[in-house]
Amino acid sequence: MVKLRLKRCGRKQRAVYRIVAIDVRSRREGRDLQKVGFYDPIKNQTFSNVPAILDFLEKGAQPTGVVHDISKKAEVLPKFRLNQTKVN
C-alpha cells in the first residue's frame, strides 16, 4: 500500500519536509517512489505537484493526517473529489 507522507530534510532545528509517495513498510527516511511536494513549516510555504498527487490518489494512495491537511489548504483534495464525481 502506498501513502503520501512527509519526509524530513534540512538541518538541525530547521526542518523542512518533502511530501513523498512511499510504501507503508518503509521508514520515514526510506526510499520514496516519487517526490510530489514540499512543505516548510517555519515559513508556512507549500509547493505541490498537483497532477502527481491526484494520480497517486486515483491509484488508491492514502494521505497521512498532516499531508491531508496540507492538501486541503492547497485545495488539492476538492479537485480530487470533483474528478471522482465526474467519473462516477
Image: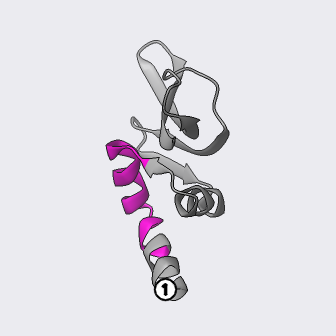
**Residue 43 location, quadrant:** top left
How many marks do you count on the picture?
A: 1
Name the residue at the top extreme.
12
Whole-percent x and y of residue 3?
Answer: 49, 42
> Looking at the picture, does residue 76 appear above or below residue 6?
below
Residue 59 vs residue 47, the one in the foreground = 59
Query: Considering depth in this image, is 41 or 29 the residue closer to the camera?
Result: 29
Q: Which residue is mark 1?
A: 88
Residue 34 image point, x, y percent: 67, 41
* SS type, badge 1: loop
| Residue at point 58%, 58% (across, down) | 59
Queried whether the magenta region covers residue 74, the answer comes back as yes
**Residue found 48% across the figure and 65% down from its top:** 76
User: What main secondary structure does the magenta stretch of the protein show?
Assistant: helix
14 left or right, relative to 22: left
Front residue of this view, candidates 66 and 14: 66
36 displayed left or right of 82: right
Residue segment shown in magenta: 63-79
Q: Amino acid at mark 1?
A: Asn
Position of 75 relative to 82 (above/below): above
Relative to residue 69, is residue 66 depicted above or below? above
